Amino acid sequence: MSIIMKIAPIVLSLLFPAVSAFADQGMAVAPSVCLRCHGDRISASAFAASPHGRNACTSCHVELTDVEKHARGELAPGKVQCERCHRLVASRYYDSVHIAKGVSCTDCHTGVHSLTPWKNDKQKVVGICGRCHQKEASVFVRSIHGKSLMAGNQDSPACNDCHGLHGIKPLGNPNSPFHKRFNSLVCMKCHSNEKMMKRNGVFTLAVKTYENSYHGKNFRLGFPERVAGCADCHTSHFVLPASNPHSTVNPNNIVKTCRRCHTRATPLFARYYPHAEPRDRKEYPVLFWTLASMTGLLVVTFAVFWVHTLLWLFRGFIENREKLGLLEDGYCELPVSDANRLYRRFRWKHIFLHMLVIISFLGLALTGLPLKFSDQPWAVTFMGFYGGAANAGVIHRVCAVITFFYFFSAIAMGIHFLFIRRDIPGNWLQRLLGPDSLFPNLRDIRDVAAMARWFLFKGPKPAFERWTYWEKFDFFAVFWGMFAIGGSGLMLWFPVFFGRFLPGWMFNVATIVHSDEALLATGFIFTVHFFNTHGRPEKFPMDFVIFNGRISRKEMYEERGDQWKRYEEAGLTDKFAVARPSGILYDFLVKGFGFMALFTGLLLLALMVYAFIGGR
């Protein structure tokens, strides 16, 4: 003991002369003095080699300024305040769960006089954390991450990669938003690094495919507590490849995993592809061809009708210019008496159903498009306005029920038109193909050809009957949409029920169909339908016939000349004549509603275009 006390100062000064020099020149007590008593417990060489080696003893034990008082027991060392030097680390530590649980610096950094730099050694981190978190550490080292890390792969995560070193947050309730977000964010941090995944032979599209799923979209919109995250399926610490029989995503265990959320999940239900890449033709041929078909439908539909719209816009503009020129020359193109007299085009039931169409369609678009474009900041804003994805889902489903209502109402009205009405001549087949029917017929082909000639200045504008070919297309598009959007929507609304008799990958198909068909519907309505109804030069800025059910004689003569002639020949014109309404308030309200709906659609169209051109 006496020998150590005598030689300790000499050893200390040889091993780290800088410390002795600094201490002797300015410190209250030189390290050599401390080692006279503590040299038997503190290794001078180990301390000199540690990160603290350039500090004197009183750098930490600042209150020990009088050695004699300390030796007599009158001056005891206080608690070391590591934050005096490690300010950034301390700021994180003071906001961590460790300080709340009474875990101090030295509980992790034991042997402070002989510390060695960790040098990013992740294995060392696991060892330190495992002193307290024994259960988690024992599970982790048996996982694919732990085995790879213990084999020396520094790409594999350790405790600090997920939880951090000092700013460790409390996870709280397992179903809390923070906990659920944490369970995915920490996984995405590495799995979004495609280079890292590729060099380790790991699936490189895990994050991308998750974000494109219903679960991932809700996660990106800020409501992770409503859906499954990475750890919900793969666990937090015991992550194993699907081929391992103990893995939670092993085919023998996947049903049990799904039932954590979907309590009645079946083996068929569990055949859902959580990380499907529809563009991978080899791995997912059904999804590939579904996506290809829907994409083709979108491209062809928009190509045909956008060209139709542009040609009409240009030709209508020229025609309006010609009409203005004729009026300036004093020529009246249409010698129509009582041009402003009104006639009934729609009954109240038609107006009511159309109002339902507008309300439900806009409701579906306002709540569905944020999910479709979940990577957009505006989508997050929309969801926040609804109070969350769950509330948006309720609104979406209410609007879906309204859609089914007017769909079946249209079918009922069609049956009534074909088989019950007495004011329309002919049998059901004659009615079906007659001028008052919305069913396509040969005349529509002639009208399309005549309209094309008019676009190209090769002939006059056709005189239409009660229904134009674009109105018939809009009407039957609802039927196609109900099977495509409605059918797929029901599958996604009640997945457990349909999972009893349909394989889970059908939900992947339903997601593609529902998403792309909804995109087609909204894009078509907000561009083609809005133009055909309100934006064409003859009607701009809006046609209110669907809100009041009335049309002037001049409009009938100009736009539906053949219908007018048929009514005249049959002596029916007076039957459909109506008085000019005096309800100013109703007129004001419906026009306000119409413009609000129009501007809402145009706003959504602008946001869709912004999303497609890469807006962030």
Image (cartoon, rainbow, N blue to C red):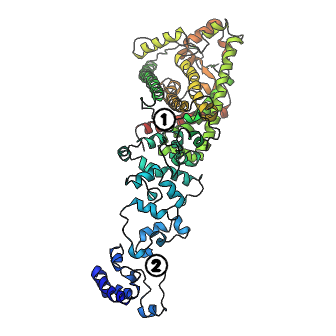
- Counting residues from the start of the chain, the first of labels 1 and 2 encountered is 2
Residue 4 lies in quadrant: bottom left
- Relative to residue 412, is residue 27 drawn left or right? left
Where is mark 2, residue-wise? 80
Task: Looking at the picture, tell me which residue is in the foreground, 432 or 317.
Answer: 432
Q: Secondary structure at mark 1?
A: helix
x, y (%) of residue 1?
A: 39, 88
Q: The disc labelled 2 sits on which kind of residue? A: Val
Which marked residue is nearer to the observer: mark 1 or mark 2?
2
| Residue type of the residue flagged with mark 1 | Leu
Q: Toward the viewer: 135 or 518?
A: 135
Q: Secondary structure at mark 2?
A: loop
Residue at label 1? 605
- The relative height of residue 37 versus residue 112 in the rendered view (above or below) is below
Q: Residue 208: image x %, image y %?
A: 44, 41
Residue 258: tell me if it is visible.
yes
Q: Quadrant of residue 52?
A: bottom left
Q: Residue at x 69, y 19 (%)?
A: 412
Q: What residue is at 54 percent from the left and 13 percent from the top?
A: 464
Residues 214 and 14: in front is 14
Question: In this rendering, is residue 145 above or below 596?
Answer: below
* Relative height, residue 603 to residue 141 (above, below): above
Residue 180, given in percent of the width and then of the height, sits at 55, 51
Q: Callout 2 environment at 10 Å: few (<14), some (14 to 19), or many (20+)?
A: some
